[in-house]
Amino acid sequence: MGLATAQLRLMYLNAYRLDLEYKEQLVAEAKMNLSKTVSDLLNVGSDLDADDPLVKKLEARKERLHVMEKELDMQMQHYREKIKMIEKDMESCEQMLEKNIERSFKY
């Protein structure tokens, strides 16, 4: 890989890593909002009778929110794995760039 190509690849990988970190941050924010919604549902349902049909609806919604939370966890884990792969690729590209610089400017 040439000097310019390695530099461009490194810039591309850095931009992609930053994009994934931003997406990971959005997922974390969504997860916090989801947790707040679950706690609000628990507070609403605490003063109702256990046999009330509304309590059963609240329980069903709470379960759906837990499923959504698990999906967000999986998505966040996916982003973290991609970020780790990109960081390894960036290290490799940086090493290649250093070798190209050494070869190009060796007297």
Image (cartoon, helix red, strand yellow):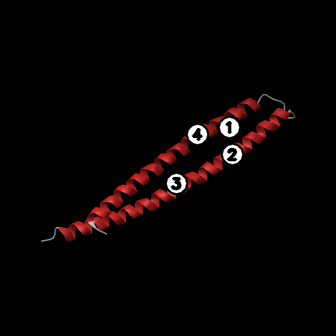
Q: Amino acid at mark 3?
A: Tyr
**CA gap, disc 1 and disc 3:** 24 Å
Of the residues under marks 2 and 3, which one precedes in the sequence? 2
Query: Residue at (50%, 44%) from the top-left corner?
Result: 25
Q: x, y (%) of residue 91? A: 36, 63
**CA gap, disc 1 and disc 2:** 8 Å
Callouts 1 and 2 close, C-beta under 8 Å: yes
Left or right of 11? Residue 31 is right
Picture layout, residue 72 above or below residue 3: above
Of the residues under marks 3 and 4, which one precedes in the sequence? 4
Q: Amino acid at mark 1?
A: Val
Which residue position holds label 4? 32
Q: Residues within 10 Å of mark 4 (few under 14, many from 20)?
A: few
Q: Amino acid at mark 4?
A: Met
Query: Residue at (47%, 46%) from the top-left corner?
Result: 22
Which residue position holds label 1? 38
Give the secondary structure at mark 1: helix
Which residue position holds label 3? 79
Query: Residue at (26%, 69%) from the top-left corner?
Result: 99
Of the residues under marks 1 and 2, which one precedes in the sequence? 1
Give the secondary structure at mark 2: helix
State the residue in front, 90 or 50. 90
Which residue position holds label 2? 66
Picture layout, residue 17 above or below residue 62: below
Left or right of 66? Residue 89 is left
Of the residues under marks 4 and 2, which one precedes in the sequence? 4
Of the residues under marks 1 and 3, which one precedes in the sequence? 1
Q: x, y (%) of residue 30? A: 58, 41
Callouts 2 and 3 close, C-beta under 8 Å: no
Query: Residue at (66%, 46%) from the top-left corner?
Result: 68
Marks 2 and 3: which is nearer the front?
3
